[in-house]
Amino acid sequence: MIKKFTFGTPFQTDAVVTQIPSTSEAFPYFQIHQENGFSLTYSMSGDDVVYGLGENMRGINKRGYRYISCCSDDAHHTEDKSSLYAAHNFIMISGDNCFGLFIDCPEKLTFDIGYTDYDTIVISTDSVDMDLYLIEESSLKEIVHSFREMIGESYIPPKWGLGYQQSRWGYLCEEDFNEVANQYESLDIPLESIYMDIDYMERYKDFTIDEKRFPHFETLVKDLKAKGIKLVPIIDAGVKVEDGYDVYEEGIQKGYFCKDKDGKPFVAAVWPGHSHFPDVLNPEVRAWFGSKYQCLIDKGIEGFWNDMNEPAIFYSEEGLKECFAYLDSIRDKNIGIEENEGLMNAVMGLANNPKDYDRFYHDIDGKPVVHTKLHNLFGYNMTRAAADGFDKVDETKRFLLFSRSSYIGMHRYGGIWTGDNCAWWSHLLLNIKMMPSLNMCGFLYTGADLGGFGADTSYDLMVRWLQFGIFTPLMRNHAAKDTREQELYQFKNTSYFRELLRFRYSFLPYLYSEYVKASKNSTMLFSPLGFDYPEDPVAVHTEDQLLLGENLMIAPVYTQNAIGRTVYLPEDMLCITFSAGEKRKMEVLKKGHHYLELSLEEFPIFLRKNSFLVLCQPSNNTESLNMNALEVIGCSDGSTMTYEYYNDDGYTKDISLDNASLITVSKETGEWVATSADDALSFYEITIMEC
Amino acid sequence: MIKKFTFGTPFQTDAVVTQIPSTSEAFPYFQIHQENGFSLTYSMSGDDVVYGLGENMRGINKRGYRYISCCSDDAHHTEDKSSLYAAHNFIMISGDNCFGLFIDCPEKLTFDIGYTDYDTIVISTDSVDMDLYLIEESSLKEIVHSFREMIGESYIPPKWGLGYQQSRWGYLCEEDFNEVANQYESLDIPLESIYMDIDYMERYKDFTIDEKRFPHFETLVKDLKAKGIKLVPIIDAGVKVEDGYDVYEEGIQKGYFCKDKDGKPFVAAVWPGHSHFPDVLNPEVRAWFGSKYQCLIDKGIEGFWNDMNEPAIFYSEEGLKECFAYLDSIRDKNIGIEENEGLMNAVMGLANNPKDYDRFYHDIDGKPVVHTKLHNLFGYNMTRAAADGFDKVDETKRFLLFSRSSYIGMHRYGGIWTGDNCAWWSHLLLNIKMMPSLNMCGFLYTGADLGGFGADTSYDLMVRWLQFGIFTPLMRNHAAKDTREQELYQFKNTSYFRELLRFRYSFLPYLYSEYVKASKNSTMLFSPLGFDYPEDPVAVHTEDQLLLGENLMIAPVYTQNAIGRTVYLPEDMLCITFSAGEKRKMEVLKKGHHYLELSLEEFPIFLRKNSFLVLCQPSNNTESLNMNALEVIGCSDGSTMTYEYYNDDGYTKDISLDNASLITVSKETGEWVATSADDALSFYEITIMEC
């Protein structure tokens, strides 16, 4: 049951796809204050758990901190940060009352969830224009389902988007890309794609290729594709100001860039220095910007990542002027405590300065609207532009697409990666905790920069992170310039990485099937344990284990030098431990806490009772992967088990669960057999443990 | 068995107090490389655990990362940092070989402990002058014992240094201090001292008091002392350049400041702007600087904290010139990726710039030695100056003294706090893990800024942090300017904080006794479980539980929204859970893993079999605490138990374990009774559980 409450005159974000009339009922549960902006206050009971907020810091239970929906380019996600790259304004309260709330408002919003006062939620914003959607259902799962149906089906990538992907900011030329491909090939380690960060462009100009460093770009794309490896270029939000650069010239001529207060194109600086932002909130501009991707598609590209689209601003001209004025004012002084702080603030405050967001305007139906009012929609609409552009090129084909910045609604057009994390063990744990929150908000195609983007990684961190990354749909190893090289061949022991990636590919039948079902059925791919075991307080408060699809639980190791970890089983489960040498150990474990010994090269998975997993033979890319010949592994008390298995060609857009196959596993004359009405499927091995 | 190996001509740091002749034997275990500096290489086996390094990032097991001994003023301890404020060059390797190694070298040292290569330790430095002490004993405990005997007894604070202490950067005037005292008093929450951060000084000048803001300083000190509350002022390393300021004038006149390459006093900027560093490596200067503390002692002060003594440098004049030259070079450009990075680096690189440490010199026996060569000794010798100065004032009295920067050797003169941490849950865990490492290196009087110094704390973080802080000798709540106010009375629910502090005071008989014994016997107050249970691999790899003294184990909760945690018991133990309302629950638990339910206002302690804890009635300060009337709580299989209990007046320096009292607890005619030859002791309650 969803009710919509409208306040003021909200901007139509298109986050919601179903038509829901606004109710005139009083808004329940919360106290509303409408002086100096808008705020909602809710009193929590001691045991209330709060879920949601998608891409964010802290735990699955968001209680005890404040979160600010204000898409931010901040690469340093320490615990005290309140804003990441996205604005996902959906929360669920589970306690005396149980409901979901989506605040459809593109302006900055603050969620104080028991931070200022441990028992009080205060949601506040300067805006007075918003739609509130209150979702009341009988369970958390049902609330998510209703919400997700309301916001529409999540983006489904081409199957190759679930392969292992390698990235690094710093690949400069064709040789660098060939080197990556060759190294993986020579070590027989799977590789699906290589990412092109900003250096492939000519002077960081969108939709250009530096011809000096990439003299045979199309050949490169083609040759790598022949090896099953795709190139995925980056596209940035800012368009370089440069005479003669076609995108710039055309944007200027058509008036497609965001304007300053005088109606001139707003100058913000990013990688190329002075740049303009395409006004992607305007449908005409969106169509224009989206059409630009075709020049790379024509060269064989099938996927993109949109970056810097919060939008990130290194400085504005006005901001820079203010900064230098301050520097001049102190340069001949005895700089003490105050001036020193002033100096740091002046320079560090240049980037992503909120004042700059007041300095430019969007053209909304012919009227200028200051960016601050619509800030959180920029990345969303840049990505929507790309997706619409792809449709114009080939409406039957799935392209790979994900974005750094996002807003709910964008989940229909592409995925997100969780932004510029660090090679910190705590960011591996953050990655684990963030997955279900992202799923709640519709973002299924997602994952973190494995191994860490900033800071130097280490062998053991890379191993443990990949032991989790093999389960995330977006599985990309990405690192920043000037950090330790972390392509898997850079480490002394590569054989274990090869094994982990082989596991990933053998796991794709289950992952792909569960992914598509989660999108089509508006369910979660990664769930907190409490969603399936709401009456079990230990399950509800377990944040370092996740349910993955309908049958699986995972419990990654995320601490350095650990030789094991404690796992909580909310019911009896089959534990399969994978060890170096592609060995498996299977054991049925009882409900309760278990300490598992797990050396660095071991990880466990857990299968729920009377369920099974489908695996296939590994391969080095999805193209050569046979997802029709399956292994079945599970545990049963003797009952017949079924699984709805979805598979397809991996690239056409026409996806229907009507094409899924029911696999039945039953015991017949003492032997477990797997059958399906789908003749394409075969089963090469069946292992069912008694439980 | 300790062997000393001398390379080059080491500077005599006085870290070691026993005379050990250098051996001419070959240095074992490691490969030595002496080209381009000095390096030691060691091959680890898969299971090797590495301990030590005192104040540092990461775990108790230091494996898997690199650590750089280079005292650094860096308030942002993210996981990728390699240097904190101290240089504690002592490690122990536990595996195929088991030994300790102390590298007595005051220059920057890098410990790559399985970071570049997971199985290799490389210790490297530019220096070629050092003493290496190799310590081989039959166990880790014995190695620590030998090492600690070699470096001399750890500082013992006055007893009031174990009370609860309140601090904040931002108390500006007398009213602020009275306000803190009154708030604690009115809520009946224990309080032992209030810290005076930099704002008490006149324009940040050491050994001055701002008379406008503190017109009745001596009265303030006296009035608060009458309430059992002491004031503890900060002293900074940098002396302000200001004509007419006596410390400055005298230092200039006597040539006591560090010099630049031209022999002029080196100008570094810190809080007051331009400043000079007293050359505390010179004994004459040390005596001079140490004598300065007396002006505050004469006003009733009995304790100090030494800060900014890495030494921190905001900028040097040369560094600032270079920075502004760079800024001028880009100011009229289209600042793109390179210049933007340059701008950030220029400004962020001003502070603690390694180049500045090459720009000043110490007078060592009449010869200038560049600071870089002796960098890690500055904070040590500033604190040694203070301690020597106190001795001159009253050689029989213990003063409170701790420092931010330190080197092994300084542990004899004062304690350390663990520097400018943040209000992060991960820093609570870091605090837990750091304690045993600090103890190994001799630092017993230590603790973290409870609640977190930087960033905004929250009620639940403060609660969980105090649940650990009640066990650390230095128990201080400290926060930075511009963060959320975190004096305990700032929160809605103060009653639980009162209970926690009452527990602290009731716990002091055990804590004080164990502290003094650890100093006198060269043992550890906080130990990793693996030190007492070396054959138990789970114990060895448990890093979130600590042994505290000879009888106790603690297992703090350090995650947000947790309702419990798993605890590993390496043997049967008595678990006592403390709940709101000063309630206790006692239960004997078997060896193995246990999940304990622990609501926010609950924490457990664990007593080893056949041992007991002594507690006393709580009080609001140590002055009014009666540590002679004791409660006994423990568990026994029926055996008679003994405990060596040390207590004293709390301030005289004359400390001998000969004055300790043996307490015997035995079962007589079915009743447990406690007895001691010390008539001063009485026992008001005895609870012994059967185990």
Image (cartoon, coloured by chain):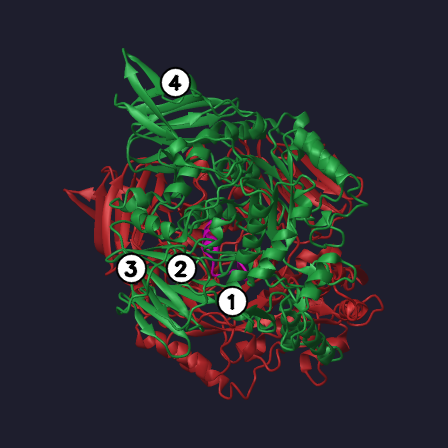
Chain colours: A red, B green
Q: Is residue A348 left or right of residue B575?
A: right
Observer-side mark, 1 or 4, equals 1
* Other residues around mark 4 within 10 Å, as few (<14) / some (14–19) / many (≥20): some
Residue B679, position as x, y percentages in the image: 41, 19
Q: Nearer the viewer, residue A664 or B146?
A: B146
Residue A353, position as x, y percentages in the image: 72, 61
Residue A537 visible in the picture = no
The residue beneath circle 1 is B374
Report if residue A432 lies within the magenta region: yes
Q: Look at the image and tell me in which quarter the C terminus of chain A lies.
A: top left
Name the subunit of mark 2: A
Residue B179 visible in the picture = yes
Q: Residue at x 39, y 57 (%)?
A: B90
Determine whether the residue tagged by mark 4 lies in a helix, strand or loop. Answer: strand
Q: Residue at x 67, y 58 (%)?
A: A377
Observer-side mark, 3 or 1, equals 1
Quarter-wise, where is residue A66 in the image? top right
Determine whether the residue tagged by mark 1 lies in a helix, strand or loop. Answer: helix
The residue beneath circle 2 is A461
The residue beneath circle 3 is A616
Question: Relative to residue A211, is residue A494 depicted above or below?
Answer: above
Q: Is residue A653 left or right of residue A84?
A: left
Distance (Cα) linking label 4 and label 3? 65 Å
* Other residues around mark 3 within 10 Å, as few (<14) / some (14–19) / many (≥20): many
Q: Residue at x 49, y 70 (%)?
A: A483
Q: Nearer the viewer, residue B123 or B112?
A: B123
Label total for image: 4
The residue beneath circle 4 is B686
Name the subunit of mark 3: A
Determine whether the residue tagged by mark 2 lies in a helix, strand or loop. Answer: helix
Q: Is residue B477 left or right of residue A499?
A: right
- Are tags 3 and 1 found on a single chain? no
